Image (spheres, rainbow, N blue to C red):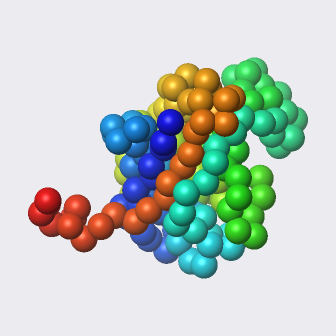
Amino acid sequence: MNLTLVRQTLTPDSTTGQLYIDGQPFCYTLELPVIDGLPGSAIPEGTYPVVLAPSPKFMASTDDWVLRYAQLIPHIYQIPDRTNILIHWGNTASDTEGCILVGQSLGTNYIGNSRLAFEHLWDRIEGPARSNDCTLTVQKQKLVDLIGVP
């Protein structure tokens, strides 16, 4: 399974985009601003393996919904100079320290219905991620996409 994150709007506060699953639009994304790919910035463009693994941060939660996923959060591996980068729920850049947030609605520096988007994503990627058959490609939107020329 291939997840593709196409970055669309870059602001000083966040980066929003669209997540595709095997070429089909799936949900919106929100990341930190694109700066240099290092901690405190959106991750660099590239293709990375996605696996399910425990998240110590979320395992410490007292929220039953969060605990349901804490043992098997999608982790993005092999990002240069980065560790513990996840795909999870949240609405604004203040909800991430470098991870990719998912949501069903999009606003300026905001995504909504994030938990529902995460549940649907987790259901789709659980099998492939468990069998090491899931990747994430991060790319910027091409100029051709912006002007609608094939």
Q: How many marks?
A: 0
Residue 42 percent coordinates (x, y): 58, 65
In the figure, residue 93 lies in which quadrant? Answer: bottom right
Relative horizontal placement of residue 116, taking residue 83 as reference (left or right): left
> Looking at this view, is 120 or 32 the one in front?
120
Q: Is residue 47 left or right of residue 149?
A: right
Residue drawn at (61%, 54%) of the image: 48
Quadrant including the C terminus? bottom left
106 up-or-down from 73: above or below: below
Residues 148 and 128: in front is 128
The residue located at (52%, 26%) in the rendering is 124
Res 21 → quadrant: top left
Task: In this rendered view, identify the residue nearer to me: 119 or 13.
Answer: 119
Q: Is residue 63 visible?
A: no
Could you say which quadrant of the image residue 147 lies in?
A: bottom left
Toward the bottom, the furthest residue is 36
Q: In this rendered view, identify the residue nearer to me: 47 or 27.
A: 47
Q: Which percent across, then down, holds residue 85?
A: 70, 53
User: From what the image shows, is residue 47 above or below residue 127?
Assistant: below
Q: Residue at x 69, y 23 (%)?
A: 65
Task: Point out the residue furthest to the left here.
Answer: 149
Q: Position of residue 19 (x, y in %)?
A: 43, 45
Whether residue 46 is visible: yes
Q: Residue at x 87, y 35 (%)?
A: 60
Residue 63 placement (x, y as % from top left) = 76, 26
Q: Relative to residue 29, is residue 88 depicted above or below?
A: above
